[in-house]
Amino acid sequence: MRGWVWAAGLLLAPLAWADQVPPRYAEHDRVLTEPQAVIQQVRQQLDRDEALDPARERDALWWMGTAGINIGDDAALAEATLRLDSLSHAHHDAAAAAAAGFLRARHLLESGGQGGLAEALRAAAQVQDTHDDALAAWATFQLCDAYTMDENAEGAVPVCLRAETAYRRLADSWGMAETENNLGINYASQQRIDDAVAMYQRSRQHFSALGADAWAASVGDNLARVELQRGRPAAALALSQESLAQEEASGRVTDALLSRANIARTYAALGQPEEALRRISGTVEDARRAGKDGLLPDLLQTRSEMAEQAKHYRQALADAREVIGLISARRTPASRTAEATLEARYAERERELRIRELERENRLKDLALKAAQAEAARRDEAQRRQELSSRMSWLVAAAMLVVALLLYLLLSNQRRHAAALREQALRDPLTGVDNRRAFLEQASALVAHRPPAGVPAHVLMLIDFDHFKRINDGAGHPQGDRVLVEVSAFLRETVGPQGQVSRIGGEEFAVLCPTLGAEAGMRLAESLRAGVAALPLPAEAGAGHITVSIGVALFDAARHRDLDGWMRAADAALYSAKSFGRDRVVASTLVG
């Protein structure tokens, strides 16, 4: 399913008006309906006007790069990003730097290269401190879009909801429509089918109201995949065919491939497995020729399922193996660590900005409190000087005291809210254990203060649930969350004062034990593994028990020069535990 990188936020003056679409959104529509014309027009404009205003040049290059991505024109994309980088350096333009970064991120995510999400996080950080509401909304949407393309619904949903709120405040219908489409994609991946349908329908209504029929049709293709899940293949086929016709007419390679894949899925649902397999095979090969490697895992997984349905088991097995290889190559431990670090920095900065905003509000309220107190004193003195009646004096003084008390209570509430935010920043909201940020702070402190000679080494355990997806897919995410809560409570109780339990990913936990040593560390890890396997699960979870795989790494200053090296060692041990059959503990021998 498709998300879009072109959001409404940087537009200052459109290059041309599209029919029916309001001038404010003309270029948003043209990058989808006339991408080749947009590229040609921008090039002519840049060549003709050497003194183009930097802000308009930035916008024009953004549309050029976006159109280049839509039709696979790598030359246009490269020209746009290079000129945006040059514009950023020449004018210290953070928005131009962010635009170049988001274009590169989109290209990496579509082509299957590593680092697409990390590039988007770096781009968002470029304008994180902006006071321009439209620019902030645009950047938040770009990050929402990158998470969506990376198929990271857990990370995407909160960012997309922030973007939707920002666009609603700006009364930006186009931005709301794009964000609703992305929310639909992420809700669908979380099996929140009713929520996904509602978002897709709202997005289509917004685009239709703006006269953007091509955009409404593209959202319709996303809706088609959900319609298949609801058992409505005829409706799904009509939506995908309508979208495909417009995509092929405008030369949008990626969107056309996705529509063709949805059509193949529809034929499979209609009981025509051979026709479905023929269509998806052609789509896979066209994606390879177009260099859209980022689409291959989903396309190959679909073909594997269709081949199995058509009883072509050798093809099904080959495709399944290729999917595993592609995902492993894209999601290496190093890339996951880099993305997690950038994500933690971005989230921490967001919280810091919010806390700073609350502190500014607190200072204003504190000044207002002092002003009210001074005003109360002045009025009281004035009343005495003017020898007004004591009744009136008491009434005025009492009113001012009430105002002062209300301001004091409001200030106290704001301070408590700021303290709660700081506490929430270090806690996982589902399980109550420490989150990734708390883990990184503690681990970094241990690396910086290494134990002296003779003192047992620090121990790091990475714990990952085995076959956890079966619970989510079989019993639903609420039951999966319930299992996470029960297991995390057991881990925290068993580890006790020996160390710190943190949730660092969806079903991935870390245990950090300062100066525990190898022997005690392995005993504790085995106790955790055996204890989890023995935990009775709720009947609603659909499984009698759950197991975990554990990778253990001792911190060795000579071998692990920094936290990244230590985590790679533990991650390699965890990978070995998974490879050797799961439900086991493996100690690392990896040199950092």
Image: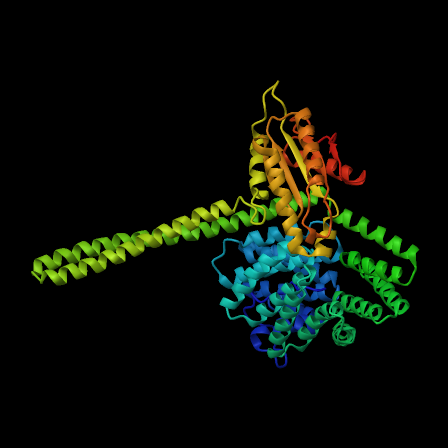
* Displayed quadrant of residue 495: top right
Percent x, y for residue 223?
A: 70, 70
Query: What colour scheme does the image use?
Result: rainbow
Say if 126 sits above or below 574 in the image.
below
- Residue drawn at point x = 54 percent, y = 45 percent: 427
Say if 176 sits above or below 587 in the image.
below
Confirm whether residue 101 shows in the render.
no
Task: Quadrant for the C terminus, please.
Answer: top right
- Residue drawn at point x = 80 percent, y = 66 percent: 261
Percent x, y for residue 63?
A: 64, 66
Relative to the observer, which residue lies in front, 22 or 215?
A: 215
Confirm whether residue 348 shows in the render.
yes
Q: In the image as oriented, which residue stretches furthest toward the top?
A: 454
Relative to the observer, which residue lies in front, 578 or 380?
A: 578
| Side of 413 relative to 149 (left or right) | left
Relative to the observer, which residue lies in front, 496 or 195?
A: 496
Percent x, y for residue 205?
A: 62, 76
Task: Quadrant for the N terminus, please.
Answer: bottom right
Say if 192 sits above or below 456 in the image.
below
- Residue drawn at point x = 71 percent, y = 57 percent: 107
* Displayed quadrant of residue 258: bottom right
| Side of 214 relative to 53 (left or right) | right
* Displayed quadrant of residue 489: top right
Report the label total.
0
Percent x, y for residue 475?
A: 70, 56
Q: In the image as oriented, which residue stretches furthest toward the left?
A: 387
| Side of 60 relative to 222 (left or right) | left
